[in-house]
Image (cartoon, rainbow, N blue to C red):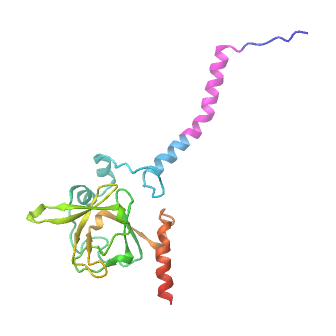
């Protein structure tokens, strides 16, 4: 008995390829949608380097004040900004990149009308440079990843550092201690758990 082999025509092969592609397409589209969605908010757990958005994207994402402060070294009005009088527990992150910058544990009332800190939460996310605008020399503070202008550093702060990081609220986003986990900053939650334990003693 001889078995007859059937040959697959090129039309059949094309049809099979189209059906396979159609089956995979929804999954690929879903994955692309998830990637695009996650790209809107920087992930602090991602190992990929932060890529700064274009100027046009920054203009669209930021308020006019946030854009002026972070991208053009602007200064918001004293006592007329979001965080100068904020006493809630939490951390402050770069409004552009999400880099962790400062903690409420190091925040103090400087009387200047701007949020002030004795030290950064993550010194590796901060860089300084000389600022010679307005006929004076000051130390400008910028975020490392996004290169956002944050404010200035002065040496008239309280102990133990003697430093005053005088920041613009517009360059930062505040994340309350009870939102750290949901926002992707759970590794900082222990700082505030220790503070709560100390307060209960």
Measured along the vertical axis of the image, is residue 54 above or below residue 83? above
* Image location (x, y in percent) of residue 73: 21, 59
* Image location (x, y in percent) of residue 191: 46, 75
Q: Is residue 6 magenta?
A: no
* Image location (x, y in percent) of residue 25: 58, 35
Residue at the spot x=61%, y=35% of the render? 24
Visible residue check, residue 177? yes
The quarter of the image holding the N terminus is top right
**Which residue is farthest right?**
1
Residue at the spot x=37%, y=64% of the render? 93
Q: 171 or 133: nearer the eye? A: 133
Measured along the vertical axis of the image, is residue 10 above or below residue 149? above
* Image location (x, y in percent) of residue 66: 28, 60
Q: From which residue to which does the magenta span run?
A: 8-28
Q: Main secondary structure of the magenta part?
A: helix
Q: Is residue 12 left or right of residue 100?
A: right
């Amino acid at each position: 008995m001889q078995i007859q082999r059937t040959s697959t025509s090129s039309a059949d092969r094309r049809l099979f390829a189209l059906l396979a592609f159609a089956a995979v397409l929804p999954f690929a589209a879903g994955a692309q949608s998830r990637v695009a969605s996650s790209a809107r908010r920087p992930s602090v757990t991602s190992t990929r380097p932060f890529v700064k958005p274009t100027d046009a994207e920054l203009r669209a994402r930021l308020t006019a004040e946030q854009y002026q402060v972070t991208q053009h070294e602007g200064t918001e009005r004293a006592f007329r900004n979001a965080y100068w009088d904020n006493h809630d527990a939490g951390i402050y992150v770069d409004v552009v990149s999400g880099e962790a910058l400062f903690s409420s544990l190091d925040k103090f009332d400087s009387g200047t009308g701007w949020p002030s800190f004795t030290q950064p939460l993550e010194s590796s996310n901060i860089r300084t440079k000389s600022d010679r605008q307005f006929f004076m020399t000051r130390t400008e503070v910028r975020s490392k990843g996004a290169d956002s202008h944050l404010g200035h550093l002065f040496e008239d702060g309280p102990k133990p550092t003697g430093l005053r990081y005088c920041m613009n609220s517009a360059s930062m986003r505040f994340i309350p201690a009870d939102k750290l986990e949901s926002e992707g900053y759970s590794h900082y939650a222990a700082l505030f758990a220790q503070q709560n334990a100390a307060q209960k003693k």
